[in-house]
Image (tube, rainbow, N blue to C red):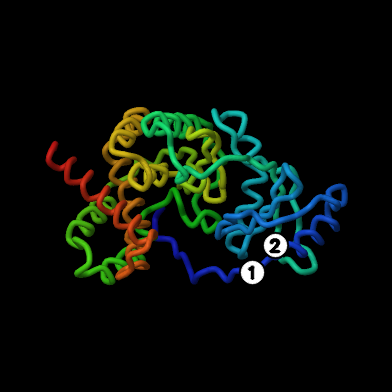
Amino acid sequence: MSSTPDLGPPPQRVTVDVEQVRRLIADQFPRWADLPVRPVAKSGWDNITFHVGDGMVARLPSASEYALAVEKEQRWLPVLAPRLPLPIPVPLVKGHPGVDYPFPWSIYRWLPGEPASAGISDPVRFALDLAGFLEALQSIDAADGPQPGKHNWFRGATLRTYDPQAQRALTTLEGHIDVDAAREIWKTALDTPWDGVDVWFHGDIAPGNLLLDSGELAAVIDFGTCGVGDPSCDMAIAWTLLTADGRQAFRERLSVDEATWARGRGWALWKTLAACAQTVNRADEEAENARRVLDEIFSEYSAGRRRA
């Protein structure tokens, strides 16, 4: 992209409760009006989700910016699903704004499973399965696919979009982490060019969006940030979740070149710096996980420089 996109102010989120969802379903999809509705235990941030009966889930954007993804998901997920080796969500119906809810929304079939953070049985097998999924996604024809934009917070575009956030985090973390090393890794990522060939990407390959069955990868969910462009954003999982052996297997299976890997490391670093800055001087699980990921990024980068 020729210029750095503007993320704008934080979204103004709305709240949604069970009674609102029941009314929306009764008004728009009366055939399901008698099904029980209950909140999903871990609902997420961009969308508020509710079980509808035993086999469906209502997914309601929590802000107007997140609602931009609804039309994209309705259009493209049915196209992507049959071309992928693992189940992904496919919308059953599209809802429209109601009396007390202002955005379009969707109902999907429920995909069961535990988030990847629950415990992976074989880290290398998991990494290879995930790489195989991303390889299949990247092989789908990207023509006419959704370009990066506000609908996916500019995933697939330049990392410079997030430079102001990264710089603020680095300022906050002075004296708490090796800021010089972080700046070097970040600058390397920013200065590493993309070849400009559009491919499909998921945009938020994270533990909560990777579902396990008996410890093995069973489904990939939440395509709200998907699009076509630079796929390096999907590489961040190599540092945020995978083991060192899994990371190597993941990279080899996907045949990731040095430039894409460097930008992927930058995506992981941006997320981690933000998390470290938010949890500075804390010692809870969130803070410990952010520091663990930062250590993974530093050690992998240092090892790569020694080999070079």
In the picture, measured across the screen, residue 3 lies left or right of residue 23, that is left
- Looking at the rendered structure, the number of numbered marks drawn on it comes to 2
Q: From the viewer's perspective, is the residue at label 1 or at label 2 nearer?
A: 1
Q: Which residue is mark 1?
A: 14
Q: Residue sitting at 56 percent across and 57 percent down?
A: 44
Q: Residues within 10 Å of mark 2 (few under 14, many from 20)?
A: some
Q: Amino acid at mark 2?
A: Phe
Residue 3, picture quadrant: bottom left
- Asked whether the residues under the numbered discs 1 and 2 touch, taking CB atoms below 8 Å apart as contact, a structural biologist would say yes
Pick the residue in front: 220 or 159: 220
Q: Which mark, residue 260?
A: none
In the picture, measured across the screen, residue 142 lies left or right of residue 275, that is right
Residue 25, picture quadrant: bottom right
Q: Which mark, residue 103?
A: 2
Task: Point out residue 74 in the picture as x, y percentages from the top left corner.
Answer: 67, 45
Q: Residue sitting at 69 percent across and 41 percent down?
A: 109
Q: Amino acid at mark 1?
A: Val
Task: Point out residue 185 in the picture as x, y percentages from the top left corner.
Answer: 23, 53
Task: Point out residue 281 in the picture as x, y percentages from the top left corner.
Answer: 30, 70
Would residue 163 be visible to someone looking at this image?
no
Quadrant housing the C terminus: top left
